[in-house]
Image: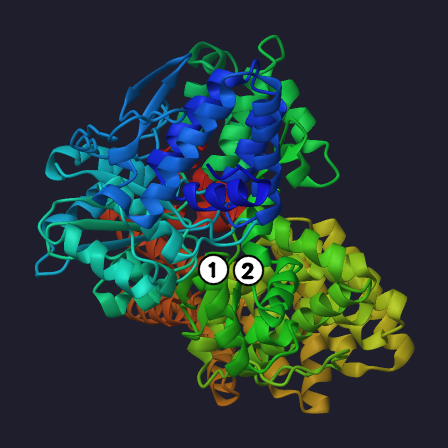
Amino acid sequence: MRSITVSRLATALTGAVREPLLWSGLSEIVSGMAEAPEDDLPRAMVAAEMEPDSRQNAIAFAEALLAQAEARSGFLPVLRVWLLQYERFVSGMGGGSASESSNAVESTQLSGTVIQAREIHGNVQVQTEPPPRPPVPHQLLPVPADFVDRQDDLTALERIRTEHRGDSALIVAVTGPAGVGKTVLVSRWLKLLTPAFPDGQLYADMTGYSLSGAQRPSDVLDRLLRALGCRQVPAELAEKAALWRSLTAGRQVALMVDNALSAAQVRPLLPGGGSSLVAVVSRRRLMGLGIDGAAFHTLDVLGAEESVELLSRRIGNQRARDEPSSVRQVAVLCAGLPLAVCVAAARMAARPQQSVAAVVGAMTEKTRPLEAFRLDGDRVVEAALDESYRALEPEVARVYRQLGVLPVDVFCLHASAAACATDVSSMGDLVEELIEASLLEELGPHPATGQPRYRLHDLIRLHAAHRAAQEEPDTASVDTERRFVDWYLATATAARTLLSPSHRRLRRDYAFPPPATSDFREAETAWDWMHSEGPHLMQLVRLAAERGWDAVCWQLVDSMQPWFLRARPYDLWVESHQLGLAAARRAGHSEGVSRMLTTGGSGMYNAGRLDDALDWFTQALRDARERGDRRAEAQALHGLGQTHRLADRLQQAAALFTEALDIRSDIGYRRGAALSRLCLGDVALAADRPDEARLCLARARAELLAVQDRYDAARALAFLGRAHAHPSLRGYAEAVRLLSTALGEFRSAGSVHWQARVLEMLGETAQEQGALETARRRFADSLALYEPVSPVDARRLKEHLHKIGWGSPRE
């Protein structure tokens, strides 16, 4: 009889590792011989199984088996029997297969097919039994008991299934970022459908983001075919795929393909017939599967309540009820990512005596926020995102890093292209790649410009910023921020130019002149953009102050003036000008200092800080006179007049407005002269001189329309309406007409504050007429608009209503 050599046995082991029945028989033999799982023999077998193509591991396993044969009597015959079985299976001797030649070895007894391997007298007779029918596969991963019911997603998936028509299998691609819970959701859905697929539910992990690399479709098909009972699998991928389609053509099976990297990786696994379902799970959108008729569902992060519910289930409802605010803080830190929630919950569950507040403190004190999501030393969340990042092409990875350092969380295509020093067309392709990889979320068009807008999930943004810190040069991230800020400065300046065409334009200093900005073709679009981007602009003002970009800091504030005037965010108005004034002074920009003092003073008096306003305008007046800038001097005088007017010092206000009017008329500043005349009309109206007020206001209205300042022209019209309602004139019908026209103009301009102001004027006019119900409605409408934008005015109106017996200031 041929001797058993290492080479012969290693060759058999290399082939047998791909034949489950043969390998299972050998595993039973090894288990019976080894004294402990950590012995050399089991370890060698596991190594050979984990790397079936490794000749080195097969040789090591063969050497370990022969060593046992030398050390233990009785083992060599058993090994010889197994080797003979394998070689008969390969050569096809006896017309059998691996299953027909299988043995079970138990001590010195053999069961199943028995071959006498020592002395043979006479004929050899082989008794075989028909191979057992393989069990119906139920391979889906278990669903955690604390699964948070994503009912909307389950309903959407079930709708896709019930609406499916056609002769081919249903393909559903469920996509989303790493850690969002795609695998758990699909497992839950398919388990609910178990009765609909009586021929089995199979699972294939394509390991698309594993460090060891993605699975080959050929290898996956090997396992799928064997799970359905196929004992001899073809060698070629095309033959395997054809056999797979044949086996599944008449069956009802559900296949979950997890961690898929591409449509090409999935396509060979598609079953035959129309009664099966394939659920593909991927971090990529896999739009290529659309060719195969796939339906798509994107899984989003959990909402705040769902995150709290998942945390509560993991750490115990009682513990969560004891510290509800801390539990919510943890949910916020996890940003709705289920993987992060589970990591945080595991940390808390491992420390049952520690308060949730202490865990929050530990999570927030980390220098890198992603460090808070470590578990037993493993960077769980960061590692998951690293897997997605490694799959990106170099240029896409560069853009991902740069988007991570942007100072705002939502950005448009043009701004991101400027930040990444890329043309808009190329940027569109790059962001599509990031969307495909579920690392970037598309939010739809900008409400003003129609440009695409994007967002990085909070934890993904942190990951991108960390990768930038690790891989970009020290100055690269700062340059990215500056290009982004310069784009916003240029765009906001373009919007201001359109919204305030008669305003004097001041200098702009760009480190990276942007190649393109938003194209505003009309003032309404410019206002819509500025109104929606106001909070982002404020973030950039703070960033510029922090970075020491002094020129850009005050110039951004200057460009935002239409937003301050119309939206009236008083706290931001004051804060931005304090930052802008300090920056302009550091930069030595005298015009910038003057502009910050005057427009900032307006914010002060509108916020009710009259003493601060007087101080700022006095500084502006002194500065303008020292520089001989008469236009700036008039602006400061006008601001002082407004401050005194709001303090009801009418005589002083009139004198200051008159002085400002004289200078503005003398230097030919038409719009400025019209504004001073408007304010003189307001003072005359307050001083019970309605005829003088009407003359001033009518002329101011006409002059402001002539210079295309429709916003201030509407202000003049509102005051003119109130002048007609003066008790000495009683022109109530004309007053209502003029005020209603002004209200419409402010609605078009988007000024909520002045809409509230005009509604208050209409309420006063109705009250003076005796139309009390109309007055009550007007005041109520005014108060509803005041409250979110101007608490000072809301409080003033409430106190007025309380005085006349129409409500309490606390209501």
Label 1 amino acid?
Answer: Ala
Look at the numbered disc 1 and give the secondary structure of its residue. Answer: loop
Residue holding disc 2: 391
**Please, what secondary structure does the residue beneath circle 2 have?**
loop
Q: Residues within 10 Å of mark 2 (few under 14, many from 20)?
A: some
Identify which residue, 698 or 476, lies in the foreground.
476
Q: Callout 1 environment at 10 Å: few (<14), some (14 to 19), or many (20+)?
A: many
Which residue is the site of mark 1?
437
Residue 108 % position (x, y): 41, 12
Disc 1 to disc 2, C-alpha distance:
9 Å
At x 61%, y 68%, the residue is 399
Tell whether 576 sits left or right of 188.
Answer: right
Residue 717 coordinates in the image, percent (x, y): 42, 73
Q: Is residue 504 left or right of residue 497?
A: right
Q: Position of residue 774 (x, y in %)?
A: 24, 50
Q: Are marks 1 and 2 in contact (CB under 8 Å)?
A: yes
Q: Is residue 108 or residue 257 the one in the foreground? A: 108
Q: Nearer the viewer, residue 21 or 593?
A: 21
The amino acid at mark 2 is Ala
The residue at 61%/87% (across/down) is 670
Report whether 192 appears left or right of 807: left
Quadrant of the image occupied by residue 165: bottom left
Residue at image coords 62%, 27%: 67
The answer to whether one can see residue 253 in this image is yes
Q: Residue furthest front?
A: 122
Picture colour scheme: rainbow
Give the mark, 1 or 2, whose residue is nearer the N terminus: 2
Height in image: 471 above or below 332? below
The image quarter containing residue 170 is bottom left
780 vs 573, left or right, is left
Residue 616: image quadrant is bottom right
Q: Position of residue 245 (x, y in %)?
A: 19, 57
